[in-house]
Image: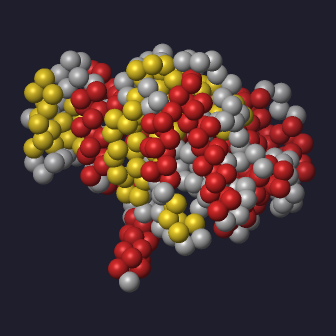
C-alpha cells in the first residue's frame, strides 16, 4: 500500500512539474556579489549536492557549505576561470554566471534538462545532461581527452563532452541512436545549408505534406548531397513520425513545427558557442557493438555510460515506428540488441552474459588509472527485482575495476520498473 501511495505521489509530482513554467530555473535577479558559490535553482536532490561537491574537489577547490546547503564559501581555488567555465551544478562563481547557467537558458522546451539539441527525438531513458557534465568533471577529463560511451543512446554524453571540449566516441547497436546522436552534435557544422534548404522544402511540400508516407519528402531528403544536412532533415521527419505515432498529431503540422524548433535549437547552439568562445570536442559516433568495441587497448581516457534497461524497457518495440522508417526489420534488429532476446529467466541470463562481455571490453579499452562511470538501476521483471546493480559491481570488480563511489540517484519516470539508479564510479 505504501509503495502504491509513493508511486501515485511521484506521478502527480511529475505531471505538476511538466505543467509549470521553467522560467524559475533561469532567474537572473538574484546575483549577490558577496557570496562566492550558489547551486543552480534546479538542483534539488541529495545526489546532486554530492556530485556538486565532488566536481568542486576534482577542479581543485576547497570550500565549506553555508546557508541551508545551497551556498558555498570558497576557501581555496586553483583556477577561478576554469570553475566558471566547467561547473555543472552552480549558477555563479564570485558574482559571475557560470557558462553552464548561460547554456541551459538556450532552451526551446518546457523541460530544464532539454536545452540546445538535447530535446530532439523523444527517446526513453535519457541521461540528465547536468549529471553528465558533472561526471565529466569528477573523473578529471580535460579538453582534448577522449570519453567513450558504448551505449550512446540519445547522445547526451556526446553533447555534454562536445560543450566541454572533450572528444567523444559514441557507439550504439541502434541506427536510430546513432542518427539522433549525430544530428545533435553535427548539425551545428551545417546550419547555413540547413537554412538554405528550409524554405525550398517547406514551400514545395506544404500542399502535399498530408501524405503520411511522405514519398515527396523522402525524394527531397535523398537528393540532399551533404550527409550532415541529410541526417538533419531525416531526423526532422522521424520526430514528426514519432509525434504522429505516440500523440496522434497530424504529420504535416508536426513536421513543420518540429523542423522550425530544431533549426532554432541548432542556431542557439551556434550562438552559445560563439558567445562563450567554446572550443568544441571532436565527435566520433558510429554503429557498433559494446561486446566487440572497435577500439585499441587502453585508448580512451574515461567512460561514462548507462547500459540499456532492456529487461524492463523494450527499446525495439518503443521505437519500432522509427526503425521501420529507417528500413530495418524489427525481428532481425531485435537479435542484435542487449536485453530484448529471450523470455523469462533466459532473457535475464542473456542480458547478464552480454553485460559481462561489455564490461570486459570497457576494461580493455580504458587507460590505466582512469575512470569508468556506469549509471544503472535494479529493474522489476515478471514481478521480481533483477539485481542489476549488484551484478554490475560484482562482475566489474572481477574484471579488474575498483569501485570508488556508489551514489544513489532518485529517478523520475519508469516508476513501474524502478525507483532509483546508482551512479557507480570505477577505476582501472
Its colouring scheme is secondary structure
> Looking at the rendering, in which quadrant would you find the N terminus?
bottom left
Residue 318, position in %: x, y? Answer: 68, 60
Residue 298, position in %: x, y? Answer: 54, 18
Q: Is residue 31 left or right of residue 212?
A: left
321 above or below 114? below
Residue 30, position in %: x, y? Answer: 19, 45
Q: Residue at x 47, y 63 (%)?
A: 418
Of 305 and 389, nearer the camera is 389
Q: Residue at x 69, y 56 (%)?
A: 340
Of 108 and 40, nearer the camera is 40
Of 352 and 135, nearer the camera is 352
Q: Residue at x 71, y 40 (%)?
A: 173
Does residue 378 appear in this view? yes
Q: Is residue 328 left or right of residue 133?
A: right
Q: Residue at x 86, y 40 (%)?
A: 220
Q: Is residue 149 left or right of residue 96?
A: right
Residue 300, position in %: x, y? Answer: 53, 21
Does residue 114 appear in this view? no
> Looking at the rendering, in which quadrant would you find the C terminus?
top left
Amino acid at each position: 500500500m505504501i509503495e502504491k501511495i509513493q508511486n501515485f505521489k511521484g506521478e502527480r509530482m511529475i505531471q505538476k512539474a511538466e505543467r509549470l513554467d521553467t522560467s524559475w530555473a533561469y532567474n537572473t535577479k538574484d546575483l549577490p556579489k558577496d557570496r562566492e558559490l550558489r547551486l543552480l535553482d534546479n538542483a534539488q536532490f541529495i545526489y546532486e549536492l554530492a556530485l556538486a561537491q565532488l566536481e568542486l574537489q576534482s577542479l581543485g577547490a576547497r570550500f565549506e557549505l553555508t546557508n541551508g546547503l545551497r551556498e558555498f564559501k570558497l576557501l581555496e581555488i586553483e583556477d577561478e576561470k576554469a570553475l566558471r567555465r566547467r561547473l555543472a551544478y552552480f549558477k555563479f562563481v564570485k558574482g559571475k554566471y557560470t557558462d553552464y547557467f548561460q547554456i541551459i537558458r538556450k532552451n526551446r522546451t518546457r523541460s530544464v534538462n532539454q536545452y540546445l539539441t538535447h530535446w530532439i527525438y523523444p527517446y526513453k531513458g535519457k541521461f540528465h545532461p547536468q549529471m553528465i557534465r558533472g561526471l565529466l568533471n569528477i573523473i578529471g577529463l580535460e579538453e582534448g581527452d577522449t570519453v567513450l560511451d558504448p551505449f550512446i543512446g540519445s547522445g547526451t554524453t556526446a553533447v555534454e563532452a562536445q560543450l566541454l571540449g572533450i572528444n567523444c566516441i559514441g557507439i550504439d547497436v541502434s541506427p536510430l541512436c546513432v542518427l539522433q546522436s549525430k544530428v545533435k552534435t553535427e548539425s551545428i557544422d551545417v546550419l547555413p545549408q540547413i537554412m538554405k534548404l528550409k524554405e525550398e522544402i517547406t514551400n514545395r511540400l506544404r500542399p502535399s505534406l498530408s501524405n503520411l508516407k511522405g514519398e515527396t519528402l523522402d525524394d527531397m531528403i535523398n537528393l540532399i548531397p551533404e550527409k550532415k544536412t541529410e541526417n538533419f532533415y531525416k531526423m526532422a521527419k522521424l520526430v514528426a513520425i514519432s509525434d504522429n505515432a505516440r500523440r496522434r498529431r497530424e504529420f504535416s503540422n508536426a513536421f513543420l513545427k518540429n523542423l522550425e524548433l530544431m533549426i532554432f535549437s541548432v542556431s542557439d547552439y551556434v550562438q552559445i558557442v560563439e558567445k562563450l568562445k567554446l572550443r568544441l570536442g571532436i565527435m566520433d559516433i558510429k554503429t557498433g557493438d559494446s561486446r566487440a568495441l572497435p577500439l585499441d587497448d587502453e585508448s580512451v581516457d574515461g567512460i561514462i555510460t548507462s547500459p540499456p534497461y532492456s529487461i524492463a524497457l523494450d527499446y525495439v518495440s518503443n521505437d519500432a515506428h522509427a526503425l521501420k522508417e529507417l528500413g530495418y526489420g524489427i525481428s532481425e534488429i531485435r537479435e542484435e540488441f542487449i536485453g530484448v532476446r529471450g523470455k523469462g529467466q533466459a532473457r535475464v541470463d542473456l542480458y547478464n552474459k552480454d553485460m559481462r562481455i561489455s564490461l570486459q571490453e570497457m576494461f580493455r579499452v580504458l587507460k590505466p588509472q582512469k575512470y569508468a562511470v556506469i549509471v544503472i538501476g535494479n529493474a522489476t521483471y515478471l514481478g521480481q527485482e533483477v539485481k542489476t546493480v549488484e551484478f554490475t559491481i560484482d562482475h566489474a570488480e572481477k574484471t579488474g575495476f575498483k569501485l570508488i563511489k556508489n551514489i544513489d540517484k532518485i529517478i523520475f519516470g519508469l516508476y513501474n520498473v524502478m525507483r532509483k539508479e546508482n551512479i557507480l564510479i570505477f577505476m582501472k
